[in-house]
Amino acid sequence: MTHYSDFIIHAYKTIARAVAEAGVNADLFKQPEFIPKTLKHRVSAELKRLAVLLRRLIFLMALQVELAPVVPRPASNYFEKSEGEPETRKAFFSVLPVPAGEAPDFLHGPITVPLRGPVPAAPLIARWEAMLETLKFCRRRAKCLARTIQRWKAEGEARPYIAPVPRTHAMPAALGIVSGALTVQLTEALRDWPPADTS
């Protein structure tokens, strides 16, 4: 499995399965209103770890995308008026200050001490669904990132440094292998990065 496309397919399936299992094991697909605090901490940590792997996978995919050269757009002058464009109006504003409203909640200070027990599940569900959507449209995101990488190379940006993912030994075996291999594959893919422009 030394070829990039074979590895990308394997890594994608492994990460997608892990993301899906993280949500299904926590019953997030049932859209609960509240979940236990310990479950929230455990699933949040798992999703955070999987997000790092997903970002690295999309970065590797972006490095494999071959883009056509960007066609420059015709220049336009913001200050020149075209025919038929309405004249701009002067902005009038009141000299009087706006009447003060209620102070924002964060200025009131803590009203109650956080209670023990279940916490709202909505933020965790939103994060899980966002990761599933990223997996669904990962090719599109890789293409957008490829344009950004193309711009970085043209501007003479320094080569990104890919550090090993911490605590890989604590991951399940399949994810640990993908994590280590992603680091190696990214390091190999970045070898042809042009040297940084230090002038």
Image (spheres, grey):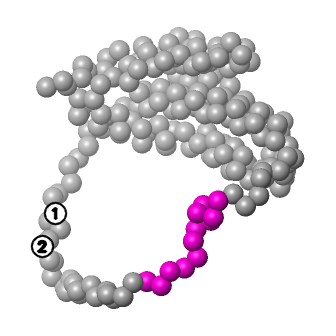
Per the rendered image, the range of residues in magenta is 98-109
Q: Nearer the viewer, residue 185 or 36?
A: 36
Which label sits on residue 22?
Answer: none
Decide: few, some or many residues near mark 1? Use Cα within 10 Å; few <14, some 14-19, many ≥20.
few
Question: Residue beneath label 1, please?
Answer: 76
Q: Pick the quarter of the image with the N terminus.
A: top right
100, above or below 163, in the image: below
- Left or right side of 48 for 37: right
Q: Is residue 100 rendered magenta in the image?
A: yes
Q: Secondary structure at mark 2?
A: loop
Mark 2 and 1 residues: CB-CB less than 8 Å, in contact?
A: yes
Decide: few, some or many residues near mark 2? Use Cα within 10 Å; few <14, some 14-19, many ≥20.
few
Q: Secondary structure at mark 1?
A: loop
- Left or right side of 123 for 193: left
Residue 70, x across and y down, in percent: 26, 43
- Circle 1: residue type: Ser
Image point 23% across, 34% down: which residue?
Answer: 155
- Circle 2: residue type: Glu
Residue 62, x across and y down, in percent: 44, 32
Image point 23% across, 47% down: which residue?
Answer: 71
Image point 49% across, 41% down: which residue?
Answer: 141
Whole-angstrom CA distance, mark 2 to mark 1, is: 8 Å
- Classify residue 88 by image quadrant: bottom left
Question: Residue beneath label 2, please?
Answer: 80
Answer yes or no: is residue 133 visible: yes
Predominant SS along the magenta part: loop
Q: Is residue 128 rendered magenta in the image?
A: no
- Left or right side of 139 for 188: left
156, above or below 190, in the image: below
Residue 158, x across and y down, in percent: 29, 25
Answer yes or no: is residue 7 visible: no
